[in-house]
């Protein structure tokens, strides 16, 4: 196993980082530098998660939005389930009387199970 040591220069930047509230930008920079310094990506991800969870809610939300925007789209509609959900939503918008309460839904589920 390789032991990772911090040079005095990187220690200064690390010390500066941990003594103030981290921003999403600082976490991204830490992640970039950490991936090149640590032999294991998993340890780095755990460290980043801990830092991110220490952020105020607004900064965490910004970080999450930025991370989600960086991902490729993963939704696929191979079974046309999304199209069906949109169709049903439009039906309910057109005729709200079709809606049922949660109690009615539960009753239908229990009836089917019996």
Image (cartoon, rainbow, N blue to C red):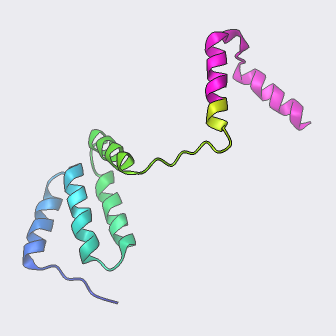
Report x, y in % for residue 34. 25, 70
* Residue 86: in magenta span: yes
Q: Position of residue 100 (x, y in %)?
A: 72, 18
Q: Is residue 22 visible?
A: no
Q: Residue at x 24, y 65 (%)?
A: 32
Nearer to us in this view, 14 or 87: 87
Q: Residue at x 16, y 79 (%)?
A: 6
The segment highlighted magenta reads 85-114
Outermost residue, right direction? 114
Q: Residue 29: percent from the left, percent from the top?
A: 20, 60
Does residue 59 belong to the magenta stretch?
no
Name the one closer to the observer, 9 or 33: 33
Q: Position of residue 73 (x, y in %)?
A: 46, 47
Q: Quadrant of the C terminus?
A: top right
Establish if 5 lies above or below 76. below
Residue drawn at (63%, 32%), measured in percent from left and top?
Answer: 83
Q: Quadrant of the N terminus?
A: bottom left
């Amino acid at each position: 196993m390789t032991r990772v040591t911090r040079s005095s220069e990187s220690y200064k930047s690390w010390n500066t980082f941990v003594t103030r509230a981290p921003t999403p930008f600082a976490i991204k920079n830490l992640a970039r530098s950490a991936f090149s310094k640590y032999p294991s990506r998993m340890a780095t991800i755990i460290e980043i998660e801990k830092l991110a969870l220490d952020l105020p809610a607004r900064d965490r939300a910004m970080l999450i939005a930025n991370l989600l925007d960086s991902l490729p789209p993963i939704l696929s509609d191979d079974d046309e389930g999304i199209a069906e959900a949109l169709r049903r939503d439009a039906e309910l918008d057109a005729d709200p009387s079709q809606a049922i309460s949660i109690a009615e839904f539960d009753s239908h589920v229990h009836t089917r199970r019996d």
